[in-house]
């Protein structure tokens, strides 16, 4: 029984079963949405830094009473 070694590089002649790539338009839309989300998050962080009392009314900081009691 001969020792078989693993190939160091994949065989590029064999096509991979990779999913179809997305179009440039889809990339553009997703990139724009991500940039807008990051901009909104940064603006919210700046507002919270400038006025910490906003944490009291911030929707992502809401806690249920049952969580406080524990």
Image (cartoon, rainbow, N blue to C red):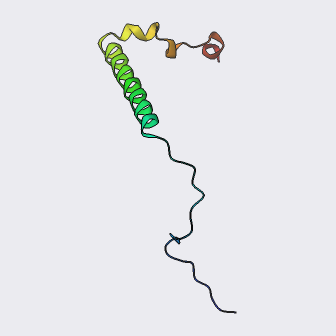
Residue 25 against residue 70 in the figure, above or below:
below
Residue 36 against residue 65 in the figure, above or below:
below
Q: Residue at x 33, y 13 (%)?
A: 47
Q: Is residue 35 left or right of residue 12?
A: left
Q: Is residue 3 left or right of residue 21?
A: right
27 or 2: nearer the viewer: 27
Horizontal and vertical percent position of residue 49:
32, 16
The residue furthest left is 50
Q: Residue at x 46, y 7 (%)?
A: 57
Residue 31 against residue 9 in the figure, above or below:
above
1 or 48: nearer the viewer: 1
Q: Residue at x 38, y 7 (%)?
A: 53
Q: Quadrant of residue 4?
A: bottom right
Horizontal and vertical percent position of residue 60:
50, 16
Q: In which quadrant is the N terminus drawn?
A: bottom right
Q: In which quadrant is the C terminus drawn?
A: top right
Total marks placed: 0
The residue furthest bottom is 1
Q: Quadrant of residue 65?
A: top right
Q: Is residue 69 left or right of residue 53?
A: right
Horizontal and vertical percent position of residue 10:
52, 70
Q: Quadrant of residue 5?
A: bottom right
Q: Residue at x 49, y 73 (%)?
A: 9
Horizontal and vertical percent position of residue 52:
36, 11
């Amino acid at each position: 029984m001969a020792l078989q070694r693993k190939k160091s590089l994949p065989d590029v002649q064999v096509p991979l079963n990779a999913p179809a790539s997305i179009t440039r338009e889809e990339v553009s839309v997703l990139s724009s949405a991500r940039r807008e989300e990051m901009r909104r998050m940064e603006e919210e962080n700046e507002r919270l830094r400038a006025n910490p009392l906003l944490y009291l009314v911030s929707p992502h900081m809401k806690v249920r009473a049952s969580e406080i009691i524990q």
